[in-house]
Each structure stands twice: as structure tokens, then as C-alpha cells.
Image: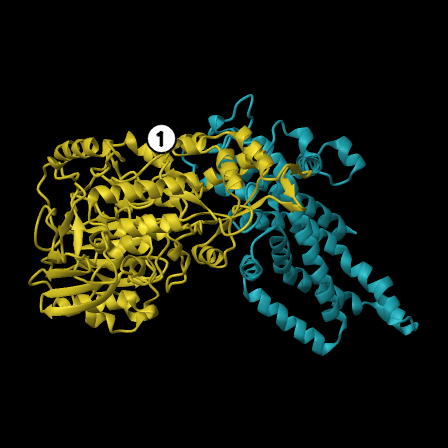
């Protein structure tokens, strides 16, 4: 099944793409955008979900803020706004909003009659407490913190109305508010210690956290009082499923075997060969939901040698053979990207001319950069220094096929004289290597709704670590021209101007050889045919089980 | 070892005439060991391809006349990688065993000869180390020192030392109370001379048997560490790492896991069989 919001990107084709997408959607929505094949949904049952992403250290996505947290917290926390499958922002916990002329203040009206699962009502003070929680350095937020950075203060005008004051206009504010990393939690629950809140955050969602057995599973149970489904849901009232067992099975072959055996109903991070195998199966179905925001790419660290030299950066990019590896390792399940943005972003700009595999050009560029000698092992040397690239790889964030792809890069780059050192690390050691600037190359997924992710990834402000210690500008590009474009794009309210500015910014990123785009952030779910009504959120592509039911 | 004993009936009369007690299994083990040692010393003679050369167009090919063991996910020839993998695997195994035995000889001798308190102290230390499974000890060491070939050698060596040390201590204590040593002491020989001439030679003979037996275990442990991503970094052709890469594709490309696994089994089994053979002869003497 192809995912509805995948729209062709860029420039003049955008309008045509949007039309095509709408037509496509019309086709899809005949089936409810889900796998419901006309049968009447039944209530009850326990759905077992097996994730291959790292087990979160904290179930509250305000803290840190990575994708594993988004996956699970989407089941029990809800944000202020969402997106429909056409990609437009729609109300959720906020029923309406208004922006002032100068863009510096926003007024949000909250949905009536909603309460958190601990009985606390959803009101303006509650949302205010959440914004403060994300911005509090003690929370150590990264993703949410960066997304809400422009909010200066919040004021509850009455029970249901909240006024926000911004330091500068923010064209991405609603997109930011649609993300699970800034979802709204009970203010009473937030008053507990961080340790307690991490173990069982309290939200307004269709499920609640009941129990968490570390290294094994989290148990989520139905919220019987649930009243706040977004407008695209196909039913109202509580969810169909009694509960969800959210298991952690990091080993991909084991996860797939568990799915085949019927031990689990849904898996994420499916290996390409298993997706291929599922294509011919009646029992196992495939949901492809590429993540929004950035494409999956290698960042070239420009802050130190040898990638402080643009010639060496271009030489590296020319020296690695990406396409052959992507087509064999991913069995046709991933399309090559030539853009800093995901293909689901309408404003993505691609330029394949910068990224052709050309070993001769790589050799020429390295010679021009002064790396003309080679040592006995065939690696280039200059002033007694070998042309070595440290490449820490997070084994929690890269599936085995991707690690094999990196090994192939290592082999082809060696022919040009690069020594690429692949260091396979667990997530926390990997964060450590980045914090110590101990890398020349890195692949770091970053998911954010909308093109403002470019500001997070390439604005010089993002070389300064967030309270969590993570900095998102890993190529460490510091360009005044780029900063200016990204700042203006994030402040303008003119769609045409915004598109133009983001296109220019992406050109600078691609032509500066700061990154090597690979493919969309892969997000493949496999599920058994007895599961109906499962879909991925049009915001960050996490699974939505509110409408899901089991026909056993 | 009943399977080996049953071989007794099928002995080759000519061979056994020259090498009493030699068995077919032992011959086969010796042949495998020789082959692996040869592969470790001269891999380029045996391997038809460069073990690191990728060729994505040839990925996931099953065993064929050209690629005897098939190809992996990057189109590398698995036979060539298995052959080249012999060197790191055997070297890690041998070096780790050497470290383990070396440490054990020091600890065991000190405990066996150093008097009551030293014996007591070392005994308790060994008991503490015994409380942790060997592989866990290796993992703890790697967690502290960071992954890599050198650390996994030291880690495996350290974790095998306690077992050897206890046996050596027992041997030394036994030899020390023997009539031969008592006679030497009564004759007024210096302690160093007694240790060198009488105790060590008699106590350490079993150590070589232990070493041969332990080599196989060390190869398995070193492969386990690589399998967990804690040994040789990519793209090294190392059996454990190849096994780890292959298991993802176990359902579709069995040869990626089968052949490196076979190499590990053969290395471990041949060293065990040879070790037993040595043990039997030493015990007979």
C-alpha cells in the first residue's frame, strides 16, 4: 500500500503534484485510508506491537525527544494540532487559533470537555505548564525545545484561551505544535519528579501507560473516557482495542519471525528483504510511511580537517557509489534522494547533478586539494597525516541493510584513498561521540514536520547544544547567507516567498557539499492481516491504533 | 567421549603400528587444523578473490562454481572471506589462550607455593571471578576498555585465566608434596632450583593439553564477541562478524551464515579433538 501523503516535490511541479495527491487521496479514502475491507469493526483484544527502535529511557517525549519516544507516546499523548492526509493542519486539542498582524502573538482556543486520564481538565493553564516544561533546561529537551524556541511567554486569557508571545514570527509554529514531542500532558502529572513522569506520562490519548517492564515491554490500556479523536478518525468514543503490548525486539530477524509466527501483530523497522517477501503474502501486509522533515543523509563535519576543505567534501561525495548499493540492499523498497528534505515535504528541492559517482573526478579533486600522495596501504597522505574519516554509526538507528551500505561506502571511498573508520556504537556512546566532535561523517535521522527542519539542521545557532546536550547542525555549517535565508523563511507568512527562500537555502546546502542525501527516512511497518484500521499519522508517520481492531 | 572411544574398532592397522592410539577422527582434526593454519598464514594462495572487494551487482548469490560459498550482501566472495577470516580468528584464539595461561601460571604458582595466606587470598579472588560466567567477565572488560581486536584478546584471555589457575594450583600443590620434591629439599637444593627442575616441569605438562583444548573455546568466545559487534571493526573478514551480518538474511541467504559458522565449528572441534588426544597421551605417561 502506498502512503497517501507522498507528493512529488518541488517548484512548478508542486501544483501538479498537489492535484495528483488529491486524486490519489480520493482513491484511498474510499477505503477509509485504512485496511478496513468493509467488515464491521469489533471491540476487544490485545494488539502486540514489536518495535526495533531503541527502548526509550523516558516515555515522556518532552525529555530529549527522539523517534522511539514519538512512536510510543503517540498512543497516549495528543498534540494541539494535527494534519489531515492532504497535509493540511487540522485542529486537535486546540479547536481554533489566530495570529496577530505582526506574527508576534498567537491566540489558541482549546477543545471543550477534554480531561487528562488522571481527571485534570485540559485548560489554558495546563498547556502553559507544558510549554514551560519543554523550555525548562531541567527537562533536558532537544526536539521540542528547538521547535518551540521562539515562544517567549504564554498567558491564559481564560479557561480555554491561551495567548503566546513570540520573539520573532514563526511560520512553522503550527507544524511544530503537530509533533508528538510537544504533545500535551497533565500538569498535575508533570509536577511529579522526572523519574516518575518518565515511567508513566499522563495525557488525553486513547490509551494509557499501565506498566513498563524494562527491556521487555510497555503495557498500554484503553482510556474508557476518551473523547478527543481528531476529525479524520473513522469512529468516536473509546478505542476498539482493549490494550496494546508494546514489545522491544531489537533483533530484526527475531522480530520478523515473531510476526510470521503470529506472536506479534505489527512490527516496525522491517528489513528490506522481509518487505519484499511480504509482497506476495496474504498473511502479512506492508505500510510504507516515510518520515517527514529531513531525508536520511550523511553529514560531513565541516568544523575540522579534512572536511573543512570543500574540495575534499566534494571528492568524498564523488567517490562513494550510493545507487548500486541502495538498489541491491533495499530490494527496491527505498528510492534514492538528492534533497536535504524528505520526499513527503512539498518544498523539497532535489539536484542529482551534485551527487553522481565519479571516481576520476574524486581523484582529480583530491590532487587539487593537495592530497596527491598515497601510503603503502593505498590511503592518501598529506604532511604525514592519513586521509582518515571517523564514522560513528548508531546500531539502534541504522538497520543492518544501512550498515552494509556504509560498508560499501567504505570500500568505494578506499579506492579514492579515503580511510573510513566505521565505529558501530550503541545510542548513548554515539551521542557521546557527537558531543565530543569525534566524527567526520555521521548519519543522524531528524524528523520534524515541515521544511523548518532546515533551520534546525543548518542554521549556525544549531551548532550550540540544546539542554539535552544534542546539537542538530552536525555538518556544523556556519554560513551567514544560509542563516539569513532560513531566518527569513521561518518568519515570512507569504507562501510563495517561503518556498523561494527554502529553495535557495537547499541549493546552498547541496552545492556546498555539506551532506550526501541517501533516501527518505525509512519507516516500513509490517502487520498481520487480522489487524484492520491501522494507519500512520500524517504528521510524523508514527502508527495510529485508535481506529484499529482485531478480527481473529 | 563415547563417540571417540567407539572409533577404536576402526583403527587403521598400519597407522596405529607407527602411532599407537591414533584415530581417524584425530587424523581428520589434524588435517583441518593444518588447513586452517595454512589459510591463516597464506590466505592469498587459497582465496580466489579479494575478501574486501565489493560488487553490489553480484550480491546475495548462492554457492556456485565461481563463488563456492556464495556471496554476501555486498557481493563479496564468502569463501575468500572465510579463508581470510582464519588469521584473525586463530590469532585472537591463540593470543587469548597465551594470555590466559600466562596469567594462570603466575597466579597458580604463587598460590601453590606462596604459603597459606597467599594461597587463601588468590583462592578467594579466583572464587569471585568464578562467580561470574567467563563471557560476562569478557564483556565487563570490553565495556571498560572499549571494543576492538586487542581488547577482545585481553578480555578472552582474562576470562579464561581463573579456570587454568585453579588447575595449575592443584597440580603444583600435588607435585610439591611428592616424595621427589621432599627428597630434593632434604638434599638441600635451593628453592629456585627445586621450582625450576622439579615442580614446574611436572606441574606444567598438563598446561599444554589445557592450552590446546582451550584454543577452541577461545576461538568460539572471540567469535561471540565479534558477533556482538565488540571485536574486529567492519569491513574485516572475521567469522563472528560474518555470522552477525548473515543472520539478518538467514531466511533468504542461508550460505552467508552457514559457512562462517562451519569454520568456527571446525576450528573449535579440531582443537578439542587434538587436545583430547594429547591429554590421553600425557595421562598415559
- Name the residue located 77 percent from the left edge and 40 percent from the top edge: B20
Nearer to us in this view, A148 or A112:
A148
**Snapshot quadrant of residue A132:** bottom left
**Element marked by disc 1:** loop
Q: Mark 1 lies on which chain?
A: A
State the cyan chain.
B
Q: In this view of the protein, which residue sits in the foreground, B78 or B172?
A: B78
Name which residue lies at 40% across and 61% down. A465
x then y, percent, for residue A521: 34, 43
Q: Is residue B83 left or right of residue A531?
A: right
Quarter occupied by the C terminus of chain A: top left
Residue A189, how many percent across, how many down? 22, 70
The image quarter containing residue A362 is top right
Q: Residue furthest bottom?
A: B117
Residue sitting nearer the eye, B253 or A168: A168
Q: Is residue B103 depicted above or below A481 in this figure?
A: below
Query: Is any part of residue A323 visible from this angle?
Result: yes
Q: How many marks?
A: 1
Give residue A18's quadrant in the image.
Answer: top left
Residue A69 percent across, percent down from the top left:
30, 56
Name the residue rendered at 71%, 50% in the picture. Answer: B279
Q: Is residue A49 visible?
A: no
Which residue extends farthest top? Answer: B65
The residue drawn where x is 39% and y is 34% is A330
> Height in image: A411 above or below A436?
above
Chain A, hue in figure: yellow
The residue that label 1 is drawn on is A332
Q: Which of A531 and B2 is in front in this view?
A: A531
Q: In this view, does A437 lie above or below A359?
A: below
Amino acid at each position: 500500500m502506498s502512503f497517501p501523503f507522498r507528493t512529488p516535490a518541488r517548484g512548478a511541479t508542486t501544483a501538479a503534484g498537489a492535484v495528483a495527491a488529491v486524486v490519489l487521496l480520493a482513491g484511498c479514502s474510499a477505503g477509509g485510508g485504512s485496511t478496513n475491507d468493509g467488515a464491521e469493526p469489533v471491540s476487544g483484544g490485545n494488539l502486540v506491537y514489536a518495535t526495533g527502535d531503541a527502548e526509550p529511557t523516558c516515555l515522556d517525549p518532552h525529555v530529549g525527544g527522539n523517534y522511539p519516544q514519538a512512536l510510543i507516546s503517540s498512543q497516549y499523548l495528543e498534540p494541539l494540532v494535527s494534519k489531515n492526509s492532504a497535509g493540511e493542519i487540522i485542529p486537535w486539542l486546540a479547536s481554533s487559533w489566530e495570529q496577530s498582524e505582526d506574527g508576534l502573538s498567537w491566540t489558541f482556543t482549546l477543545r471543550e470537555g477534554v480531561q487528562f486520564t488522571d481527571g485534570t481538565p485540559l485548560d489554558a493553564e495546563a498547556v502553559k505548564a507544558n510549554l514551560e516544561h519543554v523550555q525548562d533546561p531541567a527537562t533536558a529537551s532537544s526536539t521540542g525545545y528547538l521547535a518551540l524556541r521562539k515562544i517567549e511567554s504564554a498567558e491564559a486569557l481564560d479557561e480555554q484561551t491561551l495567548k503566546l508571545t513570540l520573539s520573532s514570527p514563526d511560520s512553522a509554529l503550527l507544524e511544530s505544535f503537530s509533533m508528538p514531542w510537544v504533545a500535551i500532558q497533565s500538569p498535575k502529572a508533570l509536577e511529579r519528579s522526572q523519574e516518575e513522569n518518565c515511567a508513566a506520562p499522563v495525557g488525553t490519548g486513547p490509551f494509557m501507560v499501565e506498566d513498563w517492564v524494562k527491556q521487555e515491554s510497555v503495557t498500554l490500556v484503553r482510556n474508557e473516557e476518551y473523547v478527543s479523536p481528531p476529525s479524520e478518525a473513522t469512529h468516536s468514543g473509546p478505542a476498539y482495542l482493549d490494550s496494546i503490548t508494546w514489545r522491544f525486539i531489537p533483533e530484526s530477524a527475531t522480530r520478523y519471525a515473531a510476526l510470521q509466527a503470529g506472536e506479534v501483530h505489527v512490527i516496525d523497522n522491517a528489513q528490506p528483504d522481509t518487505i519484499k517477501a511480504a509482497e506476495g503474502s496474504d498473511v502479512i501486509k506492508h505500510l510504507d510511511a516515510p518520515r517527514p522533515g529531513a531525508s536520511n543523509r550523511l553529514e560531513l563535519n565541516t568544523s575540522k580537517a579534512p572536511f573543512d576543505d570543500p574540495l575534499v567534501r566534494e571528492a568524498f561525495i564523488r567517490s562513494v557509489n550510493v545507487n548500486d548499493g541502495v538498489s541491491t540492499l533495499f530490494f527496491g523498497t527505498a528510492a534514492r534522494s538528492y534533497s536535504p528534505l524528505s520526499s513527503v515535504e512539498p518544498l523539497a528541492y532535489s539536484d542529482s547533478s551534485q551527487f553522481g559517482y565519479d571516481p576520476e573526478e574524486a581523484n582529480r579533486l583530491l590532487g587539487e586539494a593537495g592530497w596527491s600522495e598515497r601510503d603503502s596501504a593505498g590511503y592518501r597522505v598529506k604532511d604525514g597525516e592519513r586521509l582518515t574519516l571517523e564514522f560513528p554509526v548508531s546500531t539502534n538507528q541504522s538497520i543492518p541493510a544501512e550498515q552494509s551500505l556504509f560498508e560499501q561506502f567504505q570500500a568505494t571511498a578506499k579506492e579514492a584513498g579515503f580511510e573510513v573508520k566505521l565505529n558501530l556504537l550503541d545510542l548513548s556512546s554515539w551521542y557521546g561521540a557527537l558531543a565530543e566532535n569525534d566524527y567526520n561523517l555521521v548519519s543522524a535521522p531528524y524528523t520534524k514536520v515541515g521544511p523548518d527542519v532546515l533551520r534546525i539542521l543548518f542554521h549556525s545557532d544549531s551548532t550550540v547544544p540544546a539542554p539535552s546536550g544534542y546539537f542538530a547542525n552536525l555538518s556544523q555549517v556556519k554560513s551567514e547567507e544560509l542563516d539569513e535565508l532560513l531566518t527569513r523563511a521561518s518568519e515570512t507568512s507569504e507562501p510563495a516567498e517561503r518556498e523561494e527562500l527554502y529553495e535557495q537555502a537547499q541549493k546552498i546546502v547541496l552545492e556546498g557539499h555539506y551532506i550526501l542525501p541517501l533516501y527518505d527516512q525509512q519507516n516500513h511497518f509490517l502487520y498481520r492481516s487480522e489487524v484492520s484500521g491501522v494507519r500512520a499519522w500524517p504528521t510524523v508517520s508514527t502508527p495510529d491504533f485508535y481506529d484499529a481492531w482485531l478480527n481473529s | 567421549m563415547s563417540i571417540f572411544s567407539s572409533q577404536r574398532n576402526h583403527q587403521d592397522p598400519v597407522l596405529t603400528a607407527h602411532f599407537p592410539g591414533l584415530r581417524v577422527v584425530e587424523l581428520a582434526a589434524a588435517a583441518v587444523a593444518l588447513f586452517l593454519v595454512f589459510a591463516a598464514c597464506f590466505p592469498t594462495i587459497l582465496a580466489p578473490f579479494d575478501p574486501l572487494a565489493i560488487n553490489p551487482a553480484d550480491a546475495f548469490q548462492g554457492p556456485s562454481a565461481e563463488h563456492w560459498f556464495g556471496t554476501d550482501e555486498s557481493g563479496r566472495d564468502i569463501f575468500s572471506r572465510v579463508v581470510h577470516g582464519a588469521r584473525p580468528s586463530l590469532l585472537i584464539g591463540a593470543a587469548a589462550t597465551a594470555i590466559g595461561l600466562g596469567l594462570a601460571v603466575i597466579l597458580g604458582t604463587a598460590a601453590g607455593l606462596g604459603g597459606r595466606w597467599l594461597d587463601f587470598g588468590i583462592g578467594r579472588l579466583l572464587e569471585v571471578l568464578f562467580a561470574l560466567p567467563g563471557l560476562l567477565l569478557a564483556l565487563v572488560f570490553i565495556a571498560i576498555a572499549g571494543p576492538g581486536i586487542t581488547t577482545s584478546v585481553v578480555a578472552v584471555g582474562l576470562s579464561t585465566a581463573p579456570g587454568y589457575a585453579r588447575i595449575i594450583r592443584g597440580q603444583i600443590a600435588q607435585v610439591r608434596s611428592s616424595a621427589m620434591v621432599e627428597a630434593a629439599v632434604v638434599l638441600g637444593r635451593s628453592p629456585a632450583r627445586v621450582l625450576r627442575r622439579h615442580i614446574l616441569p611436572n606441574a606444567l605438562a598438563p598446561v599444554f593439553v589445557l592450552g590446546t583444548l582451550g584454543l577452541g573455546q577461545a576461538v568460539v568466545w572471540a567469535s561471540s564477541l565479534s558477533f556482538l559487534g565488540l571485536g574486529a571493526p567492519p569491513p574485516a573478514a572475521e567469522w563472528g562478524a560474518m555470522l552477525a551480518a548473515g543472520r539478518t538474511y538467514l531466511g533468504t541467504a542461508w550460505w552467508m551464515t552457514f559457512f562462517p559458522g562451519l569454520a568456527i565449528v571446525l576450528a573449535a572441534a579440531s582443537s578439542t579433538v587434538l587436545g583430547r588426544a594429547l591429554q590421553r597421551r600425557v595421562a598415559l605417561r
